[in-house]
Image (cartoon, rainbow, N blue to C red):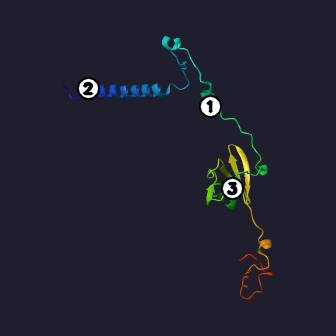
Amino acid sequence: MHLNNYKEILAWPLLLGGVGLIVWTVWDFVDRHGLPGFSVESEPVLKISNEIRSKSLTYKVDEIVAAHLFGEPAKAKQNLDQAPKTKLKLSLLGVLATDNDDYARALIQVQSKKMRTYSVGDIIEGTDAALHKVESQRVILDRKGKFESLGMQRKNLATTAGPSARTFDVPPAPGTGSNRDSTSPIPF
């Protein structure tokens, strides 16, 4: 063998291997992605056996309706401003009203039991009502989709204090006159 022939002997397998690698890469790409500009659309074939065809089909209408295939129907919105007063024996003792319902709280007493703090969405203990919204002077309760209001019962401090009530005055800031024009029954 001549020294020049070994180059030809090694070149042919390398050339064929390179061509084979390119063909395999293109084949794999076309198999995964298809050819650009060409689309072969075939309808999926559904084969139903005779065993399935012979069985009678029964539909459970209640389950189909409960599935809400096209979305849930919109509930009629009740005006929260005109929510009637609740007939539940509840007392609203305090509120923390914010724009963010995650932080809003209401202090509610059920009948004459202990008072408890409720967040929006909480069920009021011993009732079928859930706290829906907290406002500055009232809360809105949701009773099975119907809204009711529970107002805060505040006593007028000026009329209930009477003449025997103790009043406190805030001392004036240094270098200024009095910061209060009259005495107040509120101790701050």
How far from the left and from the top, in percent, is residue 128? 65, 47
- Earlier residue among tags 1 and 3: 1
How far from the left and from the top, in percent, is residue 5? 24, 26
Q: Quadrant of the C terminus?
A: bottom right
Residue under the image location 59 percent in, 21 percent down = 59
Q: Left or right: 89 with respect to 158?
A: left
Label 3 Cα neighbours within 10 Å, binned few <14 / some 14-19 / many ≥20: some
The amino acid type of the residue labelled 1 equals Ala
Q: Nearer the viewer, mark 1 or mark 3?
A: 3
**Disc 1 from disc 3: Cα separation:** 35 Å
Residue under the image location 69 percent in, 53 percent down = 133
Q: Vertical placement of 150 versus 172: above or below?
A: above
- When asked about the image quadrant of residue 89, the answer is bottom right
Q: Residue furthest left?
A: 1
**Disc 2 from disc 1: Cα separation:** 75 Å
Q: Left or right: 104 with respect to 39?
A: right
Q: Quadrant of the N terminus?
A: top left
Instruction: Answer yes or no: is residue 101 visible.
Output: yes
- Earlier residue among tags 2 and 1: 2
| Element at label 1 | helix
Q: Nearer the viewer, residue 25 or 146?
A: 146
Q: Which residue is mark 3?
A: 90
Residue under the image location 52 percent in, 11 percent down = 54
**Disc 3 from disc 2: Cα separation:** 99 Å
Q: Residue furthest front?
A: 112
The amino acid type of the residue labelled 3 equals Leu
| Element at label 3 | strand
| Element at label 2 | helix
Contact, mark 1 vs mark 3 (Cβ under 8 Å): no
Using the image, tell me which numbered label, if any, was put on residue 9.
2
Q: Which residue is mark 1?
A: 66
